[in-house]
Image (cartoon, grey):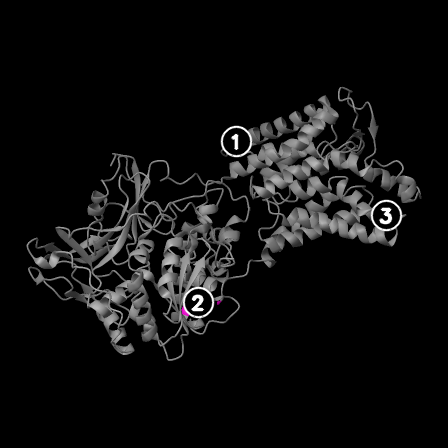
Amino acid sequence: MSDQPIIVSASPHVHSDRTSRKLMFDVVLALMPALLVSLYVFGYSAVITTVAAVVSCLVFEYLIQRYILKTPVTIGDGSALITGLLLAFNLPAGLPVWMVIAGSLVAIGIAKLSFGGLGFNVFNPALVGRVFLLVSFPVQMTRWPTAVENNTRLVDAVTGATPLGMIKEGVQFGETMSQISTRLPSHTDMLLGLTAGSLGEMSALALILGGIYLIARKVISWHIPVTVLATIALMTGLFWWADPEQFANPLLHVLSGGAILGAFYMATDLVTSPVTRKGMVVFAIGVGVITVVIRLFGSYPEGISFAILIMNAFVPLINRYFKPKRFGARIKAKMV
Amino acid sequence: MLKTFPKGGIHPPENKITSGRPIRRLPAPKVVYVPIAQHIGIPAEIIVDRKDKVTVGQVIARSGGFVSSNIHSPVAGTVTKLDMVVDTRGYKKQCIVIRTDPKDPANEDLPEEMLKTEIAMAPEEIRQRISDFGIVGLGGATFPSHVKLSVKEDQIDCLVVNGVECEPYLTADHRLMLEKSQQILVGIRILMRALGVTRAIIGIENNKCDAIDLFRKEVAGNDGIQIAALQVKYPQGGEKQLIRALLGREVPKNGLPMDVGVVVHNVGTVYAVYQAVQHNRPLTERVVTVTGKSLQDPSNFWVRIGTPISDLLEAVGGVPENTRKIVSGGPMMGKALKSTDVPVTKGTSGILVIPEGEASRGEPRNCIRCGECVNVCPMGLEPHLLMNLTEKGMYEKAAQEDILTCIECGSCSYVCPSHRPLLDYIRFGKSISRQLATKTAQQ
């Protein structure tokens, strides 16, 4: 034997090769198709917003851990990178860079590190950053550059309302769905990403592709995304069935806005979602219901960010009440 | 659809590199170190003294009570001293040191006896024989076997034979099933008679198809014995998981298999029962897998109890230079050894040599609440929660969260992507919770 001492540690002596770093980079990889679509659709402005968000998240994490908290710096674990990417995904391409940076500071500094860092945050950091920006800068945050066929166009050249925004506005002006729908993009356009919306929510197809990758790699389970989307479809379907002139069809609701982005990437955040499958389903139903209520009856056209944040707050409670079934708990022991 | 238990479990790389290696006999070592506490329960009492001549199979330490077991001399020779030895768990234990007499013909390996299928003994005699001949659970738990046979009439309706061997690397039971299948079947009939049951199931995981096929071929006509192929999933060899997989019965929390009408014995134990009842041979040897990817010649051996582990490692070409960990048992539940001057005991199923690079644990990071530990826990526990509660000293709460039902299979620590030492904390929490429970019971 070599002169190096042998290691004595408790079992198990083998470990699966999955690490949290690998999980994080799988998420980054899964976001790439959607990011590529955005870069194609929005061109430079998407590059600037994404780079600003990612770099500022990493820098803030580094600075705060190094100089304020004086704890080990963990920017290498990939979680700040994901927060940056997801924050960018939730912003309109071409948002002023300083606003992006302010959003990153709130996401990393307040939502993540002040709660104790990775694993201790109650709310999804990227969503906290987005909602902070949305309530602080409502005008800039809802100026959506529309998809243009020529991606060399400058930011702000064309702005338009999102499909959900058009519906909300139309309904408020007393229009019927058949009148509104003449202005709406086709379902195919929405699937491919040729519509107005935030940076990362453009192409439902690209997002679903990445989502399927995450499920196949077992980074996330299907329970949350499927339940969120099913709840949205079911609920909006009921309203649509009751009055198709007043409410949009469920397919439009599922394909538009941040439904798919939220369901696959935001609601599934490991840290801020429940631990058990049962809990995940309960959580996801809550997200779906709140989203639909805000979309149909709230003042914002889109509500999934709020829905996820509200349900994030319930996660500790859900974890407490939806526990796995203990082995042998059904029967009382005869002997103790 | 192969049978398995429904909740939890993992499938680590199997690494059964020795499954094709027939069991070789390791000659009697020069000196054996026989601990008197090789089983769960009361240690045996030494009944020999220094300079006593002993022979193979002679009782050298007598059972210290009901939950205890006789210890027999594995060699013929002279007792040189009564000493302390560190056992595989790292505790110092009293042991009997015997110098083997190289000239004594009793130390030669006994010739293989003819298969004896007639069972002459009555149930009571069988139980007595199993108790007298020092038979304990050879799967690793080393619970005295006769205790499991002391059941009330009609309490048990099925004998489960554990041929699962779900630990990666280990192949001792697999080889034994291939080489001694007929003897094992007779052993099963002996145990069925002792228990008064008409039904037995041998559970074997599907990575041992040859053993499954062999038993299926040979069992024809042996009424009441079933062979069940199981999906490969750790920890299926755990009694509770195995009973759930084979019979769909759930052993109640804090209960025993007999609460659901089942007794489980490992195939190695069954073979030892056959030897004791049919050929008057007490338990003095067992099969040990000596394995590891870095070894020259990983093998399965028939080893006399008390053989130093260093002798075993010598027999496979020595310990390679890059070795950083030596484990007694399998990689999931085995005990890391501090030195190789530790004897083989009745519970030693394997020796695993782990090279540099695979021996150290990853750096623990923050829990990201991925819930994998919850998904894989076969007992339906929440390992991340139990670790947290233990860390914060909330032992009573941990007990309420059923920390004591943890079977310490290690699946949670295995899967944790943040390399958190979940099982270490849970073990600690368990011991404190148990102490608190006893204290409350005493008051």
Whether labels 3 and 1 belong to a single chain: the reply is: yes
Crowding near the residue tagged with mark 3, few <14, some 14–19, many ≥20 C-alpha atoms within 10 Å: many
Which of the two marks, 3 or 2, is nearer to us in this view?
3
From the image, tell me which residue sits under label 3. A247
Please, which chain is the residue tagged with disc 2 on? Answer: B
Q: Position of residue B407 (x, y in %)?
A: 42, 58
From the image, tell me which residue sits under label 2. B254
Q: CA distance from mark 3 to mark 2?
A: 56 Å
Amino acid beneath label 2: Asn
Crowding near the residue tagged with mark 1, few <14, some 14–19, many ≥20 C-alpha atoms within 10 Å: few
Please, which chain is the residue tagged with disc 3 on? Answer: A
Q: Which mark is residue A118?
A: none
Whether labels 3 and 2 belong to a single chain: the reply is: no
Whether labels 1 and 2 belong to a single chain: the reply is: no
Please, which chain is the residue tagged with disc 1 on? Answer: A
Left or right position of B277 against A304: left
Q: Which residues are magenta?
A: B249-257
Left or right position of A82 against B41: right
Amino acid beneath label 1: Gly
From the image, tell me which residue sits under label 1. A76
Q: Is residue B286 above or below residue A39?
A: below
Q: Position of residue B146 (x, y in %)?
A: 29, 71
Residue at 66%, 42% in the rendered image: A264
| Residue in front for this viewpoint, B232 or A3 | B232
Magenta part, dominant SS: loop
Q: Is residue B162 above or below residue A40?
A: below
Q: Secondary structure at mark 3?
A: loop
Amino acid beneath label 3: Phe
